[in-house]
Image (cartoon, rainbow, N blue to C red):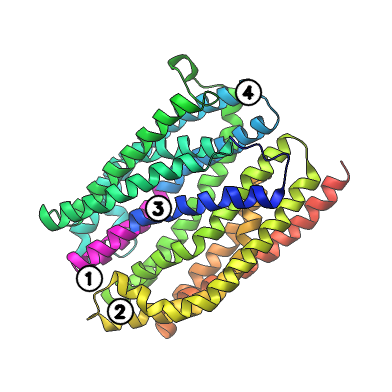
Amino acid sequence: MNNMTTGSIANHMLRFTLPLILGNIFHQLYNAVDAVIVGRLIGKPALAAVGSAGAIMNVLLFLIAGMSLGASILIAQFYGAQDYDNLKKEMGTAVKAGAVFTAFITVAALLLADTFLKLINTPAAIMPEAGCYLKIISAGLGFTFFYNIFSASLRALGNAKAPIVFLFICSVINAGLDIVFIKYCHLGVAGAAWATVVAQALAALMCFIYIAKKSPLIYLRKKDVRIEYSLLKKTMQYSGIYAFQQSFLYIGVLLVQGAVNTQGINYMAAYNAVTKVDGFALMPGDSLADSLSTFVAQNRGANQRKRILSGLKHAIFIGLLYCSFLALLLPQISGHLMGMFLDPSEQEAIAIGVSYLRIMSILYIITAVCNTFQGFYRGLGLMRITLNATVIQIPIRVILSYSLINSFQLNAVPLATGIGWSLMIIYELFEFTRYLKTSKSK
């Protein structure tokens, strides 16, 4: 456990962020390894199928992650305030309510998988493979929920290392099973899906065993798994807004995927590859925002306002340094990155992806501010602001992507995204000035 209410702010931020980065790398590897192996061993149509299914999966995953996020904010606040009784009650409430919600999402996803794929203009030629992949992954959403709630609770207590060790082990297992199921068992995209489900189940199991042995504050016995309705209301307030926000975000991504799908298989395959690169590139900034959320939540529980503002400044500075480095590096290696996902003979798809990445690399700098503020507001429990920021930027991204796609092809997506991010920053800075005025008056 790591109490962030005392000690060096920079030290806390870096020590907590670096394990989160590693954890997010391994998380990204789940999808990226599937994409690399599917693209190289099965082919471009299979890669496009996994990409279409993956876009829908992101919506489902963030619905589930919403419960974990809401619980982790409250757990971090109770931990900072040393209110261990309510901390335990919050853990029990989140586990029981989240499990019921996940069961509902699983059934809905299994029944509506083909409908979702049709809504994003998935070509008929790849519908069977995309549907198969999506249904198998959906069947394993329960494992995903338990890993998310266990790992989020550990991070709320300042322990980012243990979940990463488990995720690393399972990422290696996932990659190994991908090769075995696809290359030797000839299961196609279904093999990639089953490998992901098995690996996620192992990650959840290892987290549970670790909590049972090392983290008594969040270990639940049977009598602890019950809903405290006063806490459930607060959890659902945080979780519901976050889940809606992330779902709205990825529905926007789905709609953008629909625009890209109208351009053909080469653009679909390139877009699937570049979104994986986007995930890795943005992941350190997302990890920094998650670290700031925990830092702010613990210090809010301890009523440390000055320390909260100092943490925000540290996070923005670190984020700007990283994104500036990325803007210089990515254009130099974009061709090599695309070559990881596509066979060298697919020159047209590779060139499409390279052009996208060279534009997007400059725009990443904007996220050093807008994503960091997202983490800041989450930690304060001001979920309304994070939601509004997303609602402002996503329609802009979608509308501009569709408007520009025929003129700029895939490059329409980063152009639209950059404009959306810029509007997001303007709104977040406006709300920050209001926060400063309000907090000074208290």
Residue position marked by numbered label 4 in the rendering: 84
Residue most extreme to the right: 441
Of labels 1 and 4, the one closer to you: 4
User: Given contact means CB atoms under 8 Å apart, are the residues at marks 1 and 3 in contact?
Assistant: no
Residue at which label 2 appears: 349
- Quadrant of the frame with the N terminus: top right
Discs 4/3, front: 3
* Point 82% across, 46% down: residue: 439
Q: What type is the residue that disc 3 sits on?
A: Phe
In space, the residues marked 2 and 3 are separated at their CA atoms by 26 Å
Image coords of residue 119 (percent x, y): 33, 59
Instruction: Say which quadrant the C terminus sits in.
Output: top right
Compared to residue 270, the image places residue 159 above or below, namely: above
Question: How far is mark 1 from mark 3, CA to CA?
Answer: 24 Å
Left or right? Give the position of 309 relative to 131. Answer: right
Q: Main secondary structure of the magenta part?
A: helix
Q: Nearer the viewer, mark 1 or mark 3?
A: 3
Q: Which residue is mark 1?
A: 44
Q: Helix, strand or loop at disc 2?
A: helix
Neighbor class of circle 3 (other Cα within 10 Å; few <14, some 14-19, many 20+) is many
Q: Which residue does the numbered mark 3 point to in the structure image?
A: 26
Query: In the image, what residue type sits under mark 2?
Result: Ala
Earlier-in-chain disc, 1 versus 3: 3
Indicate the position of residue 107 as horizontal and vertical percent values. 31, 38
Identified at 60% across, 32% down, the residue is 75
